[in-house]
Amino acid sequence: MFENLTERLRVAFKGLTGGGRLKEEHIKGTLKAVREALLEADVALPVVKEFVRTVQDKSIGHQIAAHLAPEQEFLKIVQSELIHLMGEANVGLNLKAVPPVVILCAGLQGSGKTTTSAKLAKWIKENLQKSVAMVSTDIYRPAAIEQLKTLANEVGALFIESQPNEKPVHIVERALSQAKKQQQAVLIIDTAGRLHVDPMMMEEVKQIHRAANPTEVLFIVDSMTGQDAVNSAKAFNEALPLTGVILTKTDGDARGGAALSIRQVTGKPIKFMGIGEKISALELFHPDRVASRILGMGDVLSLIEEVERKVDKDKAEKLAKKIKKGQGFDLNDLRDQLKQMLNMGGMASFMDKLPGMGAIPQTLKAKVNDKEILRSVAILDSMTNRERSVPTLIANSGSRKRRIAAGSGSDIQNINRVLKQHEQMQKMMKKMSGKGGVTKLMRSLQGRLPPGMLPP
């Protein structure tokens, strides 16, 4: 997310040069580039105008700290205003009500409402340790009801049945009663969407709202629709007392205009963002962390939290002990590492959170994708356990390589690439196993990665 904007801002900030204060002639030129970058990112025009005006007022004549360069000082001001624009801090779910606490999910068709409802149920169960019931009022699409049922089972939520011949209000009343009887802490209501905002849909969702009396009314919106996302958010905000927004498909959005506009236009906080297709791919929206990503400064806090949640700690500990003892890094270990990477959202998600990634050209970043990881995992899965434990068995055998290639739908060239990748990682792990290993490894990598990736 924000790749295009990050790249444009990085270029814009380079135009600032020396002096003890931020000078007007330099600031205006840079702000012109910032304005163009924001408009290209599909940020709403009134939001862009206000943002640029505020940054200009705070920048011109601003004293530069002795230890900072002009572009760093300006960056601090821009970062502060981006955080302010997106809402200062994360606004969590309000579940302080008599159970079942009702969460109403509304939005246009195709915004990802049903999947997001299930992601939200999983997040509540795992992070708040509360029981969750789910119901669909989308009587127009029986497939949507079945989809929610499947997803509810997947995340371990109670699914309350609904039929296409029922009225949405009756479904809600029955769901409330059933959730209460079965002592569910939260009830998530997935409403019907339409291809566009229309009076009939708005009237129906208003009736559902009156019947459900929800504590949270969340607008689910596809971030990739940019300015349209902002317009539909505004329309729903006028029809319903929204309490927050969930941005979906942010992993496919290179611009990020919706994230920068919605809070300012509707006054409602962005509470979560969907970062992938997996049912676990839902993150709290932290304005300060998102601002850091926009400016190419990474998001180490989110990365640490993700590692804490998703990395298999037992396997990680065993690998660390194994390496410390100098027992080597085999292909089983490589397979585990690649699967952990996929579990954390893949390479794009990982790189998005690393500091210094803003300095890497977009063309280079575009080449990094999960297809190669998935292909490598398929190759490793096609090997026997003994082959993964003793990689030299494969390296010296053309027949084994041909069998693995056939089993993984790959070719000999890709088998050799995986073996080479393993060999390089094995050398790296050997450096880490000796005395002062991590320091030596850092020194050997210095200069090969972008500035900011490693400590000096």
Image: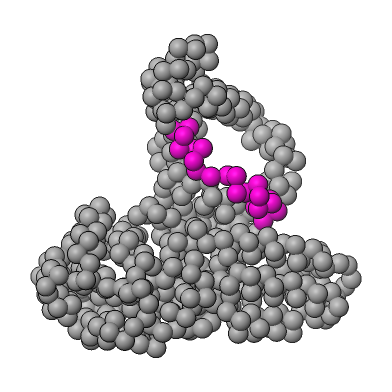
Quick check: 158 left or right of 125? left
What is the x, y in percent for residue 50? 64, 84
Most extreme residue toward the right is 19
- Residue 213 higher or lower than 154, as above or below: below
In reply to whether residue 367 is colored magenta, the answer given is yes
Count of labels in the image:
0
What is the x, y in percent for residue 168? 18, 77
- Residue 436 higher or lower than 246, as above or below: above
Quick check: 288 left or right of 267? right
Most extreme residue toward the bottom is 238
Residue 293 visible in rendering? no
In this orientation, which residue lies closer to the viewer: 222 or 299?
222
Query: Where on the picture, by quarter, is residue 150?
Result: bottom left
Please give the name of the residue rendered at 51% of the width and 37% of the height, measured from the top-left corner: 372
Query: Where on the picture, by quarter, is residue 416?
Result: top right
Please give the name of the residue rendered at 19% of the width and 64% of the height, measured from the top-left corner: 142
Residue 175 visible in rendering? yes
Quick check: 269 left or right of 130? right
Query: Where on the picture, by quarter, is residue 32?
Result: bottom right
What is the x, y in percent for residue 48? 64, 80
In this orientation, which residue lies closer to the viewer: 227 or 63?
227
Please give the name of the residue rendered at 52% of the width and 11% of the height, measured from the top-left corner: 396
- Residue 313 higher or lower than 128, as above or below: above
Q: Which residues are magenta?
A: 357-377
In this orientation, which residue lies closer to the viewer: 398 or 103?
398
Quick check: 73 left or right of 84? right
In reply to whether residue 77 is colored magenta, the answer given is no
Please give the name of the residue rendered at 32% of the width and 74% of the height, measured from the top-left corner: 194
